[in-house]
Image: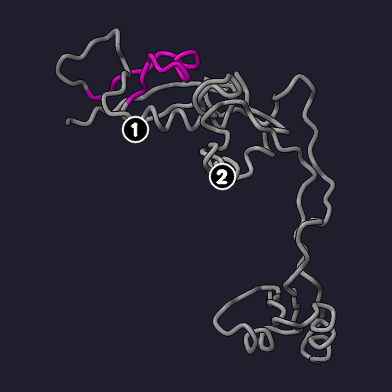
Amino acid sequence: MKLKILLILCVLLGSLTTAWAKEPKLITRYEKTAQRSPTELIIRYKSQEHFQKQAGHYSSMLSIYKQKVPHGLKIQSWAEEIRKDPAVAWVQPNHWRYALAVSVVPNDPYYLPDRNQRQYQQWYLPKINANFAWSIACGSDTLIVAVVDTGIDLNHPDIKNRLVPGITIVNQENYSATLDGMDDHGHGTHVAGIIGAGTDNNLGISGCSWYGK
């Protein structure tokens, strides 16, 4: 199949300026997770020489080293032992911290976990914490994103309402101006859907951006 290179302008990622009806507020508070106790220490050495002796080929401009607590030892006891080393400037537990954000779960059927699975079908969105980002902003309807790919299915129910006219850059036989930008492979539609499929509309998948073109 000949490659048709298309430039499709579609509604997709938005700026982090508009989202819900309320003006979004930046999350600035943090808390320690209640689900996980620290199992690592962060150690700051007084010099690069001392750091290199401990870290080997690893490098750090701040001479900071991360070390797991040996099995069976309490983190506080191991920290006190590390502090006895005259080469150590300070040591502290490596606490995990999370922004106080709310997880947003859209109602799109292919986003939600399958009954026979324990993970989300669109696992990559929770992987990048998109569900928490959506609590701050969901995109903007003022931004137009260009997708240079094999085209987009102009009749796809989860995308068609978010498209602006595209253009076919490389012509093929039987080219039709009425189908300018039509996908002849499927890859372009796949990419466009990940970026900006209609979201929270009880249909198909969720896009990274809920609004846009």
Judge left or right: residue 100 versus residue 156.
Answer: right
Write the residue at 79% across / 71% down: 93
Residue 94 appears at what percent x and percent y?
76, 68
Which-is-in-front pick, marks 1 and 2? 2
Direction front: furthest residue = 116
Residue under the image location 46 percent in, 19 percent down: 159
- What's under tag 2, amino acid-wise? Gln
The residue that label 2 is drawn on is 119
Residue 36 spot, x, y in % from top left: 76, 61
186 displayed left or right of 161: left
Camera-nearest residue between 211 and 35: 35
> Is 58 above or below relative to 85?
above
Q: CA distance from mark 1 to mark 2?
A: 24 Å
Image location of residue 207, percent across then percent down: 54, 29
Front residue of this view, candidates 7 and 105? 105
Name the residue beneath numbered marker 1. 187
Magenta run includes residue 153 = yes
Q: Earlier in the sequence, mark 1 or mark 2?
A: 2
Q: Is residue 34 magenta?
A: no
| Callout 1 crowding tier (Cα within 10 Å): few <14, some 14–19, many ≥20 | some
Residue drawn at (76%, 68%), measured in percent from left and top?
38
Q: Secondary structure at mark 2?
A: loop
